[in-house]
Amino acid sequence: MNKSISLEYKIIKEDISKYISLSDDEFDYYFGLLKAKKFARSENLLQSGDVCKEAYFIQSGCIRYYNLVDGEEQTGQFFFEGSWYSDYDSFLFEKPTTQTIQALEETTVAVLSKAALQKLYKEVPKFERFGRLMAENAFMGLRKYTESLTHISAEERYKLLIKSRPKVMQRVPQQYIASYLGIRPQSLSRIRKNLE
Amino acid sequence: MNKSISLEYKIIKEDISKYISLSDDEFDYYFGLLKAKKFARSENLLQSGDVCKEAYFIQSGCIRYYNLVDGEEQTGQFFFEGSWYSDYDSFLFEKPTTQTIQALEETTVAVLSKAALQKLYKEVPKFERFGRLMAENAFMGLRKYTESLTHISAEERYKLLIKSRPKVMQRVPQQYIASYLGIRPQSLSRIRKNLE
DNA sequence: TTCATTTCTTAACATATGTGAATTTCTGAG
DNA sequence: CTCAGAAATTCACATATGTTAAGAAATGAA
């Protein structure tokens, strides 16, 4: 067994505890349904055209998702250790995703398959609550981001990002930050220069 | 009893059926927890500073929500008959909302209070599933919108809106559409002129 | 360490949206 | 129906971001 890609019992227990209270047996059942996967830097967890059949809990590392539109990568979001991510739309409705999920660093994830989640909903109904809270959290995170988008300039969004998510600044290449902000790398350079 | 503000049994039954299957008794229990409210054009369902303690199902009419930032109304979304809306963030965490929810037409809603929803989660656990699906739907609707935001011009967003949501064009004043698109009314006028 | 490749920066010009002000059109209360 | 207030339009000029191209800096593989 490759220790470096094993599931981290403690971290996963801490995470699920944020959502629901489980007995030891219930937790062990949940834990037993998870798989570990490891991705190299730049490797894709999911590719455009695939059906997303898994949700990912990042144990270590960093990922982004993007959509390829007219040959341009439009970065939607960055996620770091301790976060869940899946393409809900594809995951729930089993339709081909338009997203690519890419590891930006060497990244270890716990994988919860759709089949496993459905087992959980059935065998341990309080996981419906887990699903609800996950979706609610995802919604609120997205809404906060969305509201900032239309109404403030790229420069303001950049300043906000520096302030609110320094990890992104430290660990994500600038071209992807530009893509996330919805501007060109050249424009981000210009903005950075103006702020000096 | 004022017939014009009564709950419409059939519409509400159809709506909940999209999410979960209920026995007649379960539905009646749910239905009994709802209240009807009617709002005049321009009236607010919720005001900035209030705690949002209710979710609204629009039976007829049309609402928008907006945030007031630096004296400017930033419209987040429009909702029509058949949609649910609530400020999740305020509703879930009982904190003061920054949103104002405003009726754009005379609007009749079914009100599901937080207390009622918690009763439902407790008495009819399959409502956890309802909550999950509502949050998932809300998330996906928002994500679709968000992805269009950063990466295309206001003109493209406007054309997309015409195509995908003609109701908005027909029923929402232009100044609010501009605010939703993140531009000034003057800019929307210019865009409309260019498209002629 | 070195070199090829990728990423970042800079600059000049193009384009889209903002701003402020004036005008026209629409709307609803009376 | 009328008219005052609100909403939409138009215009001239200001500003932010895009585009293209070139060069500088950083990075990773050998």
Image (spheres, coloured by chain):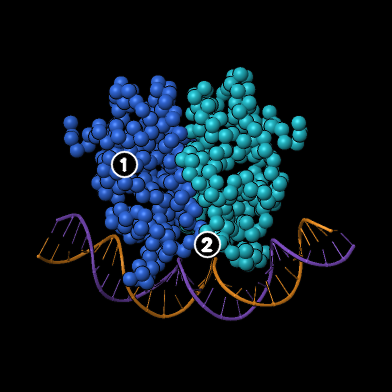
Chain colours: A cyan, B blue, C purple, D orange
Residue at image location 18% in from the left, 34% down from the top: B2
Q: Position of residue B125 (x, y in %)?
A: 43, 23
- B137 displayed left or right of A120: left
Q: Circle 2 is placed at which residue position?
A: A70
Q: Does residue A174 show up?
A: yes
Query: What is the quadrant of residue A74 in the picture?
Result: bottom right
Residue A148 higher or lower than A115, as above or below: below
The CA span between labels 1 and 2 is 35 Å
Near-viewer residue (B59 or B196): B196
The answer to whether marks 1 and 2 mark residues whose Cβ atoms lie closer than 8 Å is no
Residue B52 higher or lower than B151, as above or below: above
Q: Position of residue B195 (x, y in %)?
A: 36, 69
Residue at image location 63% in from the left, 27% down from the top: A31
Q: Write down the chain letter for disc 1.
A: B
Q: Amino acid at mark 2?
A: Asp
Disc 1 versus disc 2: nearer the observer: 2
Q: Circle 1 is placed at which residue position?
A: B82
Q: Does residue B186 show up?
A: no
Secondary element type, mark 1 = loop
Secondary element type, mark 2 = loop
Q: Quadrant of the N terminus of chain A?
A: top right
